Image (cartoon, helix red, strand yellow):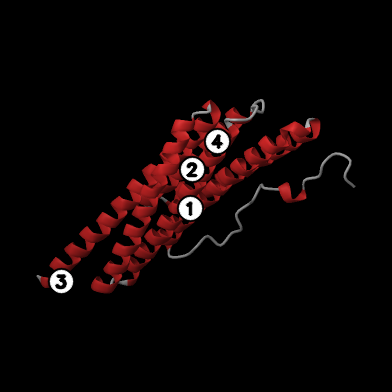
Amino acid sequence: MTTAHTVTVFDNDLEHIQALIMKMGGLVETAILDAAQALDTRDEELADRVRRNDTLIDELEEKVNSEAARLIALRAPAASDLRTILSVMKISANLERVGDYAKNIAKRSTVLAQMQPIAGAGGALRRMAKAVEVMMKDALDAYTQRDVELAADVRMRDQDVDQMYNAMFREFLTHMMEDPRNITACMHLHFIAKNLERVGDHATSIAEQVIYLVTGAMPDDIRPKGDDTAFARADGDS
């Protein structure tokens, strides 16, 4: 009777923590899309809301960590349950970082709203934001459903995001070389694209946590990376 009661209490506590994770995930998904929309439409009010709402994401991460630590201390979970709790804590850390990236994008959007727009940049970044937001949503769905196949699919999609980033990186270089007056705006846009590329990396990290949670092991293959900007050269370089 006591054991059954203890197990029920533990399951309820764990379910509550996982509900916090999903709430956090919903806020993060919204933040990504709102930050991209604020950039595309030059909506400074929306950008400001994204920045302010990051506090809610930070507070949820603190709550997840606090309750997870309490659960470990009070319930002495078995190995499989401990794996779940540790995965939850890592997922919340990933989500918190994504919230920071959305906030950073919103900050730069406010600056860019005062500058001459770069043709095509807003739409391209919004498409990239949608791609990483879907990755994040699918990674969280994979977590709630314990779906290893969906998690593996998210993991492989990160290469597509890297390729989108590569294309934008080269586009921004072209704009800067064609007209030095574009340099400041393009540098801000590049950092926004890099933030979105990092969101894809964090969605991938969550997907890998799902694989670890279900199988007990992290993926042993090397995930292909498509970011080759470290090797990019301007025309005329030798």
Q: Residue 14, relative to residue 33: is it above or below?
A: below
Question: Dot 2 corresponds to which residue?
Answer: 135
Secondary structure found at label 2: helix
Is mark 3 in CB contact (under 8 Å) with mark 4? Answer: no
How far apart marks 1 and 3 lie (CA) works out to: 38 Å
User: In this rendering, which labeled residue sits more in front, label 2 or label 3?
Assistant: 2
Secondary structure found at label 3: helix
Residue 57: percent from left, percent from top: 38, 49
Query: How busy is the neighbourhood of tag 1: few (under 14 within 10 Å), some, or many (20 plus)?
Result: some
Question: Would residue 76 be seen by someone viewing this image from the given angle?
Answer: no
How far apart marks 4 and 2 lie (CA) works out to: 23 Å
How far apart marks 2 and 3 lie (CA) works out to: 39 Å
Give me the disc on residue 109: 4
Mark 3 vs 4, N-terminal side: 3
Which residue shows up at 63% across the image and 30% down it? 115
Mark 2 vs 3, N-terminal side: 3
Mark 2 vs 1, N-terminal side: 1
Which residue shows up at 66% across the image and 25% down it? 119
Mark 1 vs 3, N-terminal side: 3
User: In this rendering, which labeled residue sits more in front, label 4 or label 2?
Assistant: 4
Mark 4 vs 2, N-terminal side: 4
Residue 92: percent from left, percent from top: 40, 56
Question: Dot 3 corresponds to which residue?
Answer: 3
Identify which amino acid the numbered label 3 is placed on. Thr
Query: How busy is the neighbourhood of tag 2: few (under 14 within 10 Å), some, or many (20 plus)?
Result: many
Which residue shows up at 15% across the image and 71% down it? 3
Identify which amino acid the numbered label 4 is placed on. Ser
Question: Dot 1 corresponds to which residue?
Answer: 97
In the picture, which quadrant includes the N terminus?
Answer: bottom left
Q: Is residue 209 left or right of residue 60?
A: right
Identify which amino acid the numbered label 1 is placed on. Arg
Which residue shows up at 52% across the image and 60% down it? 219
